[in-house]
Amino acid sequence: MITNKPNSEAVSRFATQLQEAPAEVEGRSLWQDARRRFMHNKAAMISLITLSVIILLCLFGSQLGDFTYDDIDWNAMQIAPDTASGHFFGTDSLGRDLFVRTLVGGQISLMVGVLGALVAIVIGTLYGAMAGFIGGRTDSFMMRTLEILNSFPFMFFVILLVTFFGRNIMLIFIAIGAVSWLDMARIVRGQTLSLKSKEFIEAAHVCGVSTWAIITRHIVPNVLGIVVVYATLLVPSMILFESFLSYLGLGVQEPMTSWGALLNEGSKTMEVAPWQLLFPAGFLVTTLFCFNFVGDGLRDALDPKDR
Amino acid sequence: MLKFVFKRLIEAIPTLLVLILVSFVLMHAAPGSPFTGERSLPPEILANIEAKYGLDQPLYVQFFHYLGGLLQGDLGPSFKYKDFSVNELVGQSFPVSAEIGLWAFLTAVVLGVLFGVVAALKQNTWVDYGVMSLAMTGVVIPSFVLAPLLVLIFAVHLRWLPAGGWNGGEWMYMLLPVLAMAAHYISSIARIMRGSMIEIMHSNFIRTARAKGLPAGYIIWRHALKPALLPVISYLGPAFVGIITGSVVIETIFGLPGIGQLFVNGSLNRDYSMVLGITVLIGALTIMFNAIVDIMYAYIDPKIRY
């Protein structure tokens, strides 16, 4: 041992200092940092609160009305919104309460949005991480496949699927999720390529960790930031996707409804009953706005260039 | 350059084949046949009909038959409109969609670039904020919300424009559909253009041009515009797909006799050959357009040479 006496003394002093060091000095993690910055972003915070209100309303608000979504009020067909009759948003042409229908439709739209985004993210992240990490011929094959898929007109494809296999909300989830993971995969692959040569990955290799474990334990957690940002931007596009299908009459089936289906009904009767269009449209557009602002806020908060 | 163009066009072929194969297989994997209606046909007649459309042959024979038809530009007979072939139906409605789509696309590019440049040059003034909040709204509001709202305002209340119909392509009838279709892309392009324009205006070669004393308009036109357009060009592919897809909904709303409406009706009627034919046609268009965008990109950006 080359360690001489003064050195070992210094080391032991440092060790005791470490043990006695006050617990308050804590490092700030990436996520704590991001949270602080996100809280300072007014537009994002307001959007987040609005969004939470909308989500809570959709989940529990339908209990507030006196009606269920498929109740027909024979005395009140297509009446304008008023509080006296209990139809806060009016009724549709079949006498069903629009307030409850909007909220129930919101449940479906939000559920499709979140689940669709989830499917897209799981597939996209794993695919991108795998392609980027394995590299070589596998990578170029996987990316080539991606390019081919990317040049498909997907909306037509989904309509094709829905036509051939019947209208089914589960099918819509899967169809939407399965076709929207392409961008996600490309983003994650780019991130993975830059992570791949980092020391901690090399260390994991040296320790004999399997490829799959490296991808799931080391690569994926490190690309999570960008995945979260992309996810919040993906949810509104999923909601749009579903509304689009429902608008064409290819989405959810009556008497169940979604914002797109309501908009479709509303646009048919807008000359005599504009509230049928305006309330669902208001909810849909507000939700889309909020998701976009939250996504932008998260991107600003998590962007490492912006330290 | 010529070699790159050639290579890019060759590469499009397998993509197209995969698209055709997948759509074809999906169509045949679908449960039920297009001829099972409310009245079930006697098995002998069903067999006859299937023989007429070649549905009794093995799948791969049918596929090569279909492919052979496609090569000659034949999309096959329509299963629902008995007296028409898919070609005839598509031939009637395609020009309508193409006209609307083309105008929407041009409007989106011209106005989007214009707004983006103006916002960038007036950065952080009320002009910039105004244009950008308008663009944010345009990005978020989907076309199937915007279109009924436009109809409600301009057709129902103000009575300036017709609420729908085609009427041989009179401009009055095209204005609202084109606007509803283009709004989202005007906004997206304006946002992209603003970002890239601001970046370019702060770069060294623009400072040099300024230092030489060139007039501002000349700098923007000759030096800044071309590099600033690159991100917009790479957005043109997705925008094209989006406008084609959007046409499905816009045509339904405005009652235009275009290909989108044909597609929706076809899928609601389970007219398989029609749906398949249109998917293949749109797919081919998309793939071709993506190739053209790539070639354009390589032509404009001197850094890309293959």
Image (spheres, coloured by chain):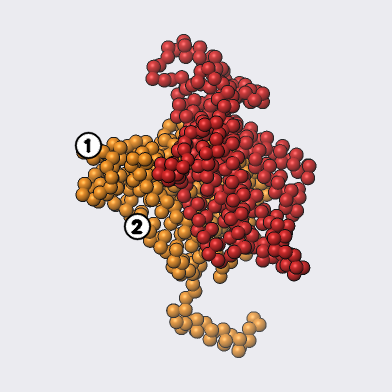
Chain colours: A orange, B red
In this rendered view, identify the residue nearer to me: A222 or A3: A222
Q: Label 2 belongs to which residue?
A: A53
Depth order, front residue of B32/B213: B213
Q: Position of residue A114 (x, y in %)?
A: 43, 50
**Could you say which disc has been placed on residue A74 in the image?**
1
Q: Residue at x 75, y 39 (%)?
A: B6
Question: In percent of the image, x 52 and y 48: which residue is there?
Answer: B183
Name the chain under label 1.
A
N-terminal of the two: label 1 or label 2? Answer: 2
**Extreme residue in the bottom direction:** A6
Q: Is residue A201 above or below residue A123?
A: below
Q: How many angstroms separate mark 1 from mark 2 (CA)?
A: 31 Å
Q: Which amino acid, mark 1?
A: Trp
- Image quarter (top left, top right, bottom left or bottom right) of the N terminus of chain B: top right
Secondary structure state at the residue bearing disc 2: helix
Give the secondary structure at mark 1.
loop
Identify which residue is drawn at 57% across, 43% down: B104
- What amino acid type is highlighted by mark number 2? Val
In terms of image quadrants, where is residue B204? Answer: bottom right
Tell which of A196 and B286 is nearer to you: B286
